[in-house]
Image (cartoon, rainbow, N blue to C red):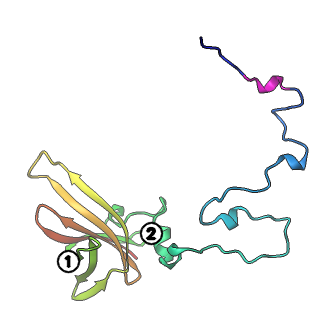
Amino acid sequence: MYTEHTFDILNVPGVDPLRTPSTPGSFPQKRAPMGRNSAIKAFDPANKTGIPLDLFSGRDTRRPVIVELLRSPWIVRGSQVASGSSGHGGKRREEEVEVSWDGTRRTPESFRMHGKRYSVDALVQTWALERAWWDPRARLSRRCFRVLARGGLYDLAYDRITDRWLLVGIVD
């Protein structure tokens, strides 16, 4: 036999659901860890003594700051910026480049553009681009890599149909 039990917080004596508890001991004193910047989130303005905060400890601190920033959703992808210069500092272009591939990490190791070699400092993002797979004339199949090299952000794409590497975007 099934018996339904209900609990109505509005009918509990001594509990007002519209107000916070008035006793300071009723609030939890310790919080669970909130992530990498927990020292910022748990800052107590009442403690004016000034304690050095360990904000960026761990293995990920050796990663360049630009890599962390570019993972945010408000950064515009270089391949999405309109042709020519823009206010974002991005350029959309499509030119063939020579890429050396790192087989163990499965990422571009370096690329050569206009006779200069650009060593890849970090891989920021990867994505696949498939368009019009049903139409052989308009088909597009690319594996794209956003890399950090020489302080700039470059979008490299491997065209699976033509078997060549392309530079498809730059963000300065």
Labels 2 and 1: the sequence-earlier one: 2
Q: Is residue 23 left or right of residue 117?
A: right
92 vs 161, nearest the viewer: 161
Task: For mark 2, give the secondary structure.
Answer: loop
Pick the quarter of the image with the C terminus: bottom left
**Which amino acid is tagged 2?**
Gly
Pick the quarter of the image with the N terminus: top right
Q: Is residue 119 left or right of residue 34?
A: left
Residue under pointer 2:
87
Q: Is residue 90 above or below residue 139?
A: below
**Image coords of residue 117 (percent x, y):** 26, 87
What residue lies at 68% left-to-right and 56% top-to-bottom? 32
**Image coords of residue 108 (percent x, y):** 27, 75
What residue lies at 83% left-to-right and 22% top-to-bottom? 11
Q: Is residue 10 above or below residue 150?
A: above
Residue found farthest to the top: 1
Residue under pointer 1:
97
Residue found farthest to the left: 136
46 vs 105, nearest the viewer: 105
- Boundaries of the magenta span: 7-12
Task: For mark 1, give the secondary structure.
Answer: loop
Tell me which corner region of the image, top left, top right, bottom left or bottom right, holds residue 9.
top right
**Image coords of residue 4 (percent x, y):** 65, 16
Q: Is residue 42 left or right of residue 126?
A: right
119 vs 88, nearest the viewer: 119
Q: Is residue 28 left or right of residue 80?
A: right
129 vs 100, nearest the viewer: 100
Tell me which corner region of the image, top left, top right, bottom left or bottom right, holds residue 99.
bottom left
What residue lies at 70% left-to-right and 74% top-to-bottom? 53
Task: Tell me if mark 1 has few (under 14), some (14-19) or many (20+) residues whose alpha carbon lies within 10 angstroms of its own.
Answer: some
